[in-house]
Image (spheres, rainbow, N blue to C red):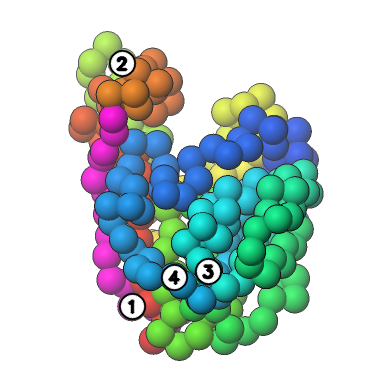
């Protein structure tokens, strides 16, 4: 675990938190990605215990509450995001437990407890993928489900300039890199799809589904025009990677 990277990322997220309030929560998995309403990766979650890794403003947990989850648990690096989630979920019918913590550490979460753990566009912020996936495996009951989405590893490696797609960095290059997408320096991680899959397998997960499809409405096409995620680029390079796995 890289404490300097975590400190930098926490500072960055505290400064940018309001910009991401309610951004791409479930049933969305990410920009121009298929919806949970169509994928049904979680199935019926009535009376199940769910944990959100990188819960942000709590809108994905709100979605789980609307689908009758019994317990809502979440952790996030940003104190502002946790406070926003606490306010959003104050009147929901489910039991709510929220922790301000990096995903690389267990802030007091029970082990062998959760039916579902998920992470929506957050896992790529980890400074230690092995430790994070080891923690998630411990949180889950045997047979429990882990679903995560993140920016597709090819997306940031390919540029679309005047309609021509060109590699700006090798797909094989992995590890931390500087991210300044919203004006506050932060550290992201780049991993190949095989790294995500092999690390899941090494920590006792069975991979059940890998999704790289692109889906968007006419509204999405217009909303993302000339932005980081554009439909023109998405026609050739997926925006989002989604993986469903299960604890053996």
Q: Look at mark 3 in the image and give the residue it sits on.
A: 69
Q: Is residue 217 left or right of residue 127?
A: left
Instruction: Report the front residue among 48 and 216.
Output: 48
In the displayed structure, 42 sits above or below 25; it is below
Q: Residue at x 39, y 28 (%)?
A: 229
Contact? badges 2 and 4 (CB < 8 Å):
no
**Residue 15 image offset from top left, x and y in percent:** 75, 33
Q: Look at mark 2 in the image and give the residue it sits on.
A: 161
**Residue 62 image offset from top left, x and y in percent:** 57, 54
Q: Earlier in the sequence, mark 3 or mark 4?
A: 4
Q: Earlier in the sequence, mark 4 or mark 1?
A: 4
Contact? badges 2 and 3 (CB < 8 Å):
no
Q: Residue at x 35, y 68 (%)?
A: 43
Contact? badges 3 and 4 (CB < 8 Å):
yes
Q: Earlier in the sequence, mark 2 or mark 1?
A: 2
Q: Is residue 189 magenta?
A: no
Instruction: Report the front residue among 15 and 35.
Output: 35
Q: Nearer the viewer, mark 4 or mark 1?
A: 4
**Residue 125 image offset from top left, x and y in percent:** 58, 50
Q: Secondary structure at mark 3?
A: loop
Q: Earlier in the sequence, mark 2 or mark 3?
A: 3
Contact? badges 2 and 1 (CB < 8 Å):
no
CA–CA distance in space, label 2 to label 1: 39 Å
* Label drawn at residue 206: 1
CA–CA distance in space, label 3 to label 4: 6 Å
Q: Is residue 211 magenta?
A: yes
Q: Look at mark 4 in the image and give the residue it sits on.
A: 45
Q: Secondary structure at mark 2?
A: strand
Q: Nearer the viewer, mark 2 or mark 4?
A: 4
Part of the protein shown in magenta: 199-217
CA–CA distance in space, label 3 to label 1: 24 Å
CA–CA distance in space, label 4 to label 1: 20 Å
């Amino acid at each position: 675990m890289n404490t300097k990277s975590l400190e930098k990322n926490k500072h960055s997220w505290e400064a940018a938190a309001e910009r991401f309030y309610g951004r791409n929560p479930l049933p969305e998995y990410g920009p121009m990605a298929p919806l949970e309403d169509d994928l049904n990766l979680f199935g019926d979650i009535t009376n199940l215990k769910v944990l959100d890794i990188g819960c942000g403003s709590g809108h994905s947990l709100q979605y789980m509450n609307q689908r009758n989850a019994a317990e809502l648990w979440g952790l996030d690096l940003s104190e502002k995001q946790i406070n926003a989630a606490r306010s959003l979920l104050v009147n929901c019918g489910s039991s709510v437990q929220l922790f301000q913590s990096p995903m690389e550490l267990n802030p007091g979460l029970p082990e062998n407890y959760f039916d579902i753990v998920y992470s929506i566009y957050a896992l790529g912020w980890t400074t230690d993928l092995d430790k994070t996936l080891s923690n998630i495996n411990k949180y889950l009951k045997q047979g429990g489900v882990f679903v995560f989405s993140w920016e597709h590893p090819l997306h940031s490696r390919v540029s679309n300039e005047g309609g021509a797609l060109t590699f700006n960095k090798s797909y094989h290059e992995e590890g931390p890199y500087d991210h300044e997408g919203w004006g506050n320096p932060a550290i992201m991680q780049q991993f190949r799809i095989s790294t995500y899959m092999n690390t899941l397998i090494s920590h006792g997960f069975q991979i059940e589904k890998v999704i790289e499809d692109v889906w968007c409405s006419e509204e999405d096409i217009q909303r993302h025009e000339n932005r980081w995620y554009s439909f023109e680029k998405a026609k050739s390079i997926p925006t989002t990677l989604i993986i469903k796995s299960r604890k053996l």
